[in-house]
């Protein structure tokens, strides 16, 4: 990156680096708690409910949070929300040290964190827009994908190592230290410009939230993209719920294998982030739509089937690479379409309307994934005769039902991609 670019992106880079460090700490805590909860319960549904509780309030309240975010100071909003999340982490640590931590405690704390994230997320999205000149949108989107990928790579390795030597408490302590670094960097070194706003004449929060939905209704392409991602998120969250259940249960699986597959997801995303940072930009919006559709189609048509039919960690890791290497490229093109197409003074409420529509399928998917593994596919495999075709293909041990579920969602993912590709790329008129 040239000196002039560094100068223009100085505030963004500080925010990006410190928030990424904090995200690593939070992700490590989440990974550690999933391992602890699955080991104690042996239930995919019990573990999946952690994510359900995080996303449910986020989805339900996002439509209103964006209207508030557009009115509130972005920096103050981010500081308050991050502090609240840190307090929840401290409560978790206290309960853990007292030997009183129960699953319902984690569900409540995750729900509270999800509620705060409804306001924090649109504020941080707008802050990134305000700190970035438009000509750098694709580059900074690639940088954000890069850091997200690095977090995915480092999380299982660091969390597992810290847990093995010092326990879950040490993981949480690292989380709190990274929060402190991000908090003081934002407080002391970053100035987020004010958003130029039109006079709203005392517009109510409900009316402001409605305006985000109206904007989406009048912009068909963006709305279709959001609905496309909603369908993909349903499938992806079923995947997320089933993956630990399969890899921790298989005879050739375990914590190390789960960590290795997650690390491959991160490495693939990292490679995709580097690629998109240096790729020439698509010529126009239609070309960006084609990139989005094609990368998701490749992802859906590879990873799920390799997880379904594979019996070794190597095959699962190859599936993870093929499934995730194109996602940062998709995200960068989606990000540019959103940032360049939505007026800055409307971004908070439009992003929040997007969050409600695009992410409402995530808690449903986590719940459905855990339920399908525990109550449908694992019992189905257990009841089949050992010489049946399905058992021969997917196995008979615990985790084989989750493998069968990956086959089902693989078919669903390909169908979704083909339908929305036709809708988004069909000629106008």
Image (cartoon, rainbow, N blue to C red):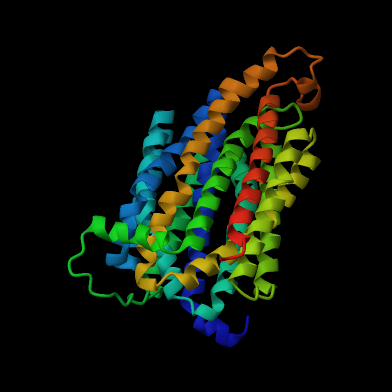
Q: Is residue 329 visible?
A: no
Image quarter (top left, top right, bottom left or bottom right) of the C terminus: bottom right
Residue, x 35% and y 43% (percent of image)?
112
- Relative to 198, is 185 on the left or the right? right
Q: Quadrant of residue 105?
A: top left
**Residue 247, placed above or below residue 207:** above
Please state the total of marks drawn on the protein image.
0
Q: Position of residue 170 (x, y in %)?
A: 51, 44
Q: Is residue 364 left or right of residue 77?
A: right
Q: Nearer the viewer, residue 160 or 103?
A: 103
Q: Position of residue 197 (x, y in %)?
A: 29, 75
Position of residue 340 relative to residue 424, above or below, is below
Q: Residue 221: where, in percent of width, then height? A: 51, 62
Which residue lies at the image location 73% right of the left edge and 34% below the top edge? 308
Q: Is residue 236 left or right of residue 113?
A: right
Q: Considering the image in quadrants, where does the N terminus appear?
A: bottom right
Quick check: 36 above or below 261? above
């Amino acid at each position: 990156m040239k000196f002039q670019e560094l100068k223009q992106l100085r505030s963004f880079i500080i925010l990006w680096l410190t928030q990424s460090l904090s995200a690593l700490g939070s992700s490590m805590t989440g990974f550690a708690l999933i391992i602890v909860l699955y080991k104690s319960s042996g239930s995919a549904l019990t573990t999946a409910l952690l994510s359900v509780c995080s996303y449910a309030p986020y989805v339900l309240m996002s439509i209103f949070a964006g209207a508030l975010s557009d009115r509130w100071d972005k920096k103050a909003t981010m500081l308050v929300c991050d502090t609240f999340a840190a307090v929840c982490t401290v409560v978790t640590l206290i309960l853990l040290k007292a030997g009183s931590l129960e699953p319902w405690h984690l569900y409540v704390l995750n729900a509270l964190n999800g509620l705060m994230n409804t306001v924090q997320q649109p504020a941080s999205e707008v802050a990134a827009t305000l700190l970035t000149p438009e000509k750098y949108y694709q580059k900074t989107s690639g940088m954000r994908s890069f850091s997200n990928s690095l977090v995915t790579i480092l999380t299982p390795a660091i969390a597992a190592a810290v847990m093995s030597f010092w326990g879950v408490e040490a993981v949480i302590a690292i989380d709190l230290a990274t929060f402190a670094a991000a908090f003081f960097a934002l407080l002391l070194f970053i100035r987020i410009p004010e958003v130029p706003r039109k006079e709203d004449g005392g517009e109510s929060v409900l009316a402001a939230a409605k305006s985000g939905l109206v904007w989406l209704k009048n912009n068909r392409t963006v709305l279709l993209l959001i609905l496309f991602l909603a369908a993909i998120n349903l499938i992806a969250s079923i995947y997320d719920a089933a993956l630990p259940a399969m890899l921790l249960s298989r005879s050739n699986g375990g914590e190390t294998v789960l960590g290795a597959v997650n690390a491959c997801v991160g490495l693939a995303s990292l490679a995709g982030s580097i690629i998109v940072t240096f790729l020439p930009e698509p010529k126009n919006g239609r070309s960006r739509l084609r990139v989005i559709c094609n990368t998701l189609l490749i992802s859906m048509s590879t990873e799920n089937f390799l997880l379904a039919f594979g019996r070794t960690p190597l095959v699962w890791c190859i599936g993870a690479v093929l499934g995730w290497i194109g996602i940062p490229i998709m995200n960068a093109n989606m990000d540019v379409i959103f940032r360049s197409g939505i007026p800055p003074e409307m971004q908070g409420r439009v992003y929040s309307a997007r969050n409600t529509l695009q992410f409402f399928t995530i808690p449903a998917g986590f719940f459905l994934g855990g339920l399908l593994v525990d109550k449908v596919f694992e019992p189905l495999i257990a009841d089949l005769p050992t010489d049946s075709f399905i058992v021969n293909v997917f196995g008979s041990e615990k985790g084989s039902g989750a493998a069968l579920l990956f086959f089902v969602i693989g078919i669903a993912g390909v169908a979704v991609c083909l339908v929305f590709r036709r809708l988004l790329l069909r000629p106008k008129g």
